[in-house]
Amino acid sequence: MSSSFELSRSLSEDRPVVALWGCQLGTGARSCVLEEEEDDDFLEHLVLLRTICLGADGGDELHVVAVDSRNTSGQQQPVPIAALRSSLLTMISLRGLELVPPVTFVLQCGSGPVYLSGQRVTLG
């Protein structure tokens, strides 16, 4: 089962618009896609990943989460960013991971649930 949410807040005309987002990866949905905003051609959009957390029903199997985004050469290739196991590491906090949409998060192994949360930022 997959779920995602967004909550946005506009600070002012000259400040960024920040939207909280989250998704769940598991057997029902192995990936989560954050698309480009089509109506804002002249604005810069960023996806900031803040936390990756293993759900209580995750078991003690290895859960590997990867991000699939364009690299500097314009190619798309999944890159593992987290390996979680309930007996060793159940959550990580990230800082400084800024991605340009479209971005796909993929549960490469494990059955989940794994929860991802972060922010979508629109810069004027």
Image: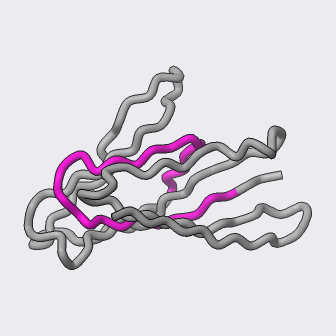
Query: How far across and down, in percent of the image, does residue 84 sit?
Result: 20, 62
Query: How far across and down, in percent of the image, does residue 68 sit?
Result: 41, 39
Q: Is residue 35 magenta?
A: no
Residue at coordinates 70% horizontally, 70% vertically from top-left? 8
Q: Nearer the viewer, residue 24 or 82?
A: 24
Name of the residue lying farthest toward the right: 13
**In the image, residue 13 above or below residue 102:** below
Residue at coordinates 44% horizontally, 63% vertically from top-left? 23
Q: Is residue 108 magenta?
A: yes
Please state if 68 lies on the left or on the right of 63 as rendered. right
Q: Which contiguous range is marked in magenta?
A: 96-121
Please state if 20 lies on the left or on the right of 23 as rendered. right
Q: Nearer the viewer, residue 74 or 41?
A: 41
Please state if 118 lies on the left or on the right of 81 as rendered. right
Query: How far across and down, in percent of the image, does residue 80 sit?
Result: 29, 44
Name of the residue lying farthest toward the bottom: 56
Query: How far across and down, in percent of the image, does residue 41 sit?
Result: 81, 39
Residue at coordinates 54% horizontally, 69% vertically from top-left? 5
Residue at coordinates 21% horizontally, 79% vertically from top-left? 56
**In the image, residue 86 above or below residue 124:** below
